[in-house]
Amino acid sequence: MDPQQILTSITDTIGGFFNNPFVQLAFQAIAVYFVVLWLAAAYWAFRDMQLRTENPILPYFAASLIILFTPILFPFGIIVYRIVRPHERIGEIYERNLAEEALLAEVEAIKSCPTCARRVNDEWIICPGCRTRLNRVCPNCGRLVGLDWSLCAWCGKDFERRDVAALETLPGGLGEPEPAEPATPAPAPAARPAIRAASIRSGSVRSAARSTVSPATDPLPER
């Protein structure tokens, strides 16, 4: 058999295979599938970059990177994007920051002595290691309060205001002490008879004044 005929028969067979309507439909479906996958990859890169950065321009840049690689080479664009994209999402960064803050708050909640840095209890008044004063007792309610507190959080006792209970003279409030009257000096022994005579004289004058006053007359005479 002539080789030219063999080559012609092979070419006709291949041409007949590709000219088959079902084969053409399958190739078209595959092409559409790759186009859709290409656009979906661009949208995925856009959404993924939105979750990883707060910059509004970078998501569009990531999507355009996938589109520039065409529907045939877009897998290479995906590989490049996965290399250059941020490694952590914004939500993961927030969760890590919250975990660090919670751990820091837990460490700060552990009370320690300011002098020897020994771990102490919240109800201790004095550090047993270095004898540093940690708390004090409220004189009003007897509960523990901090050294830097200006008043008691339990009973409202004001530590910076001096006690004025001793100055209260009335139940309604504070009273001012009345000024004392000046004491009159006692008369000398020689002046006592003169004072006594003057008092007798003034008493006689008063009795004479009463006797000179006429009594009130009756409005109607007796019959």
Image (cartoon, rainbow, N blue to C red):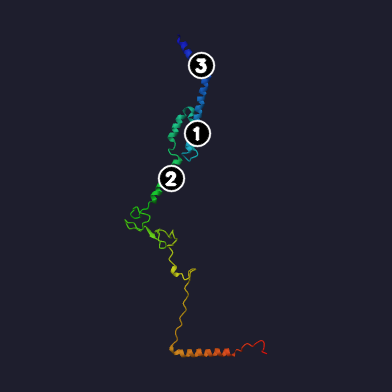
Three-letter code, disc 3: Gly
Which x, y percent locates residue 83? Answer: 42, 34
The answer to which quarter of the image holds residue 207 is bottom right
The 10 Å Cα crowd at callout 3, few under 14, some 14 to 19, many 20 or more, is few
Whichever of labels 1 and 2 marks the residue nearer the N terminus, that label is 1
Which x, y percent locates residue 212? Answer: 59, 90
Whole-number angstrom distance, CA of label 3 to CA of label 1: 39 Å
Specify the label residue 98 is tagged with.
2
Three-letter code, disc 2: Leu
| Residue under numbered circle 1 | 43
Q: Is residue 27 above or below residue 126?
A: above
Whole-number angstrom distance, CA of label 1 to CA of label 2: 30 Å
Whichever of labels 3 and 2 marks the residue nearer the N terminus, that label is 3
Mark 1 vs mark 2: in front: 2
Q: Residue at x 42, y 45 (%)?
A: 99
Q: Residue at x 46, y 89 (%)?
A: 192
**Viewer-proximal residue, 24 or 22?**
22
| Residue under numbered circle 3 | 16
**Viewer-proximal residue, 57 or 144?**
144
Which x, y percent locates residue 176? Answer: 48, 72
Q: Residue at x 47, y 37 (%)?
A: 49
